[in-house]
Amino acid sequence: MTAARGAQGLPRIDFAWELGAGTGHVATLHPIALAMKGRGHAIRFLQREPSAGTDLEGADAIPREAAPVWVGPMPYASPLNFGEILHNFGYAAEASLRPLVDAWRERLADSAAVIANVAPAAHIAARTLGVPSLEISQGFHIPPPSMPSPPLRDWEAAPRGQLEAADRRVLGAINRVFAAFGVGPLATIGELFAGRELLLTYPELDIYSERGPSEYYGITDTGEGGALPDWPAGRGPRVFAYLYRDYAQRERLLEALRALEMPALVFCRGLDAAARTRHEGTTLAFSDRPIAVSRLLPQCDVVVCHGSHQMTAQALLAGKPLLMLPTQLEQFLITRRVVRMGAALGVMPEVRDADFAAALQELGRKPVFGAAARAFAQRYAPHDRKAALATIVARCEAAISGRQP
């Protein structure tokens, strides 16, 4: 089938997101999609949460559709490796994986290329169609091509037999799907991404120490909002907080910020008016619109966030220490690395009655945290985000022309 084409006759690129949650997946792909659109390509987002990212600058220029996803029981509450994660999303049996891949094949039949952020089934479908695909990743969802894929919780027992069994179940299902379309088998899960990965991270934030020497692109300018509010009055360091509405200790944190009387700006998507009214005051302000984070960060002293890769990297590149509040495994693993770096304090999800005030005061009072964040920023000061984006765009166009997989 002939690929769909943009206004200038260039073929369509589909941007795919299948696993995970939150705006970060879309925000990572957003600037790449806009750059490809600017070069004349038709673009489309196939995303797990169709409304995610619709409040980013330029989002109205991108058509969006719901991505095919598998919904079913998740046998691993605490998956030990990437194989067990995929097991939770229908990849361990051909009976569940084949319909998912077929749905992706239908969507991608007239695509010139697939640019994915955590969409393994899109890569499988693309291979069966002969469509080139690239994976834009912060590392968590691209395990090294080893058997088995490495354990995610190196502080817990992870029997090799259990890890290998999970990987082999997933590989068996994937390879049976491939065989049905005349595609050769994979030897490891990591091989699905080999030659297709673009690691938008830094060695210090890559959770897989087993990866070895790799090409790291660093982050590009992310999709973000346009709001740049005035700072409220207050005393002490300025705090920028990017919070999830459903964070279990959100109220306790907001109370601490208000009590400390530090000037604090808070962005929390979907925060109800009652919660805002309870906490907003002379030193605590909320933004109704997504923040222009790249312009706000130079103005603040401390960043509070949940440990998403993009927000964490942006804060470190701005030389700002963090209070990190992870809500899931990937965020926890990133938090652990930044805490060990000396640039953050972390509050784990299982901690109840956390002393947020003490943590914020320590970050503002002790210069060692800021020094560690500034050391990271200085280390990567030569990194040009626009040049990184241009390189990624060039790889995308090379893939379309058949010069790369």
Image (cartoon, rainbow, N blue to C red):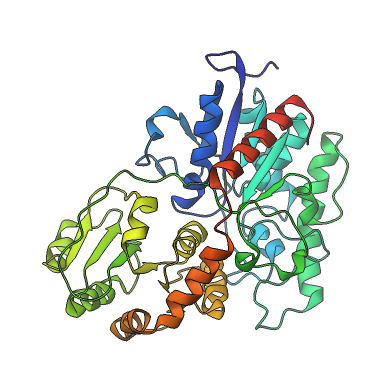
Looking at the picture, tell me which residue is in the foreground, 97 or 25.
25
Q: In the rendered image, which quarter is residue 11 located in?
A: top right
Q: In what quadrant of the picture does the N terminus appear?
A: top right
Looking at the picture, tell me which residue is in the foreground, 74 or 66.
66
Residue 187 pos. (x, y %): 87, 54
Residue occupying the point 66% across, 40% down: 122
Residue 139 pos. (x, y %): 64, 58
Residue occupying the point 56% across, 29% down: 36
Looking at the picture, tell me which residue is in the foreground, 119 or 32.
32
Q: How many marks?
A: 0
Looking at the picture, tell me which residue is in the foreground, 180 or 398.
398
Look at the image and tell me whether residue 47 can be seen: yes
Residue 327 pos. (x, y %): 45, 69
Q: In what quadrant of the picture does the C terminus appear?
A: top right
Residue occupying the point 62% across, 35% down: 393
Residue 343 pos. (x, y %): 48, 75
Residue 60, placed above or below residue 260: above
Q: In the rendered image, which quarter is residue 180 located in?
A: top right
Residue occupying the point 34% across, 45% down: 225
Residue 145, placed above or below residue 41: below
Q: Is residue 370 left or right of residue 382?
A: left
Look at the image and tell me whether residue 350 can be seen: no
Q: In the rendered image, which quarter is residue 262 located in?
A: bottom left
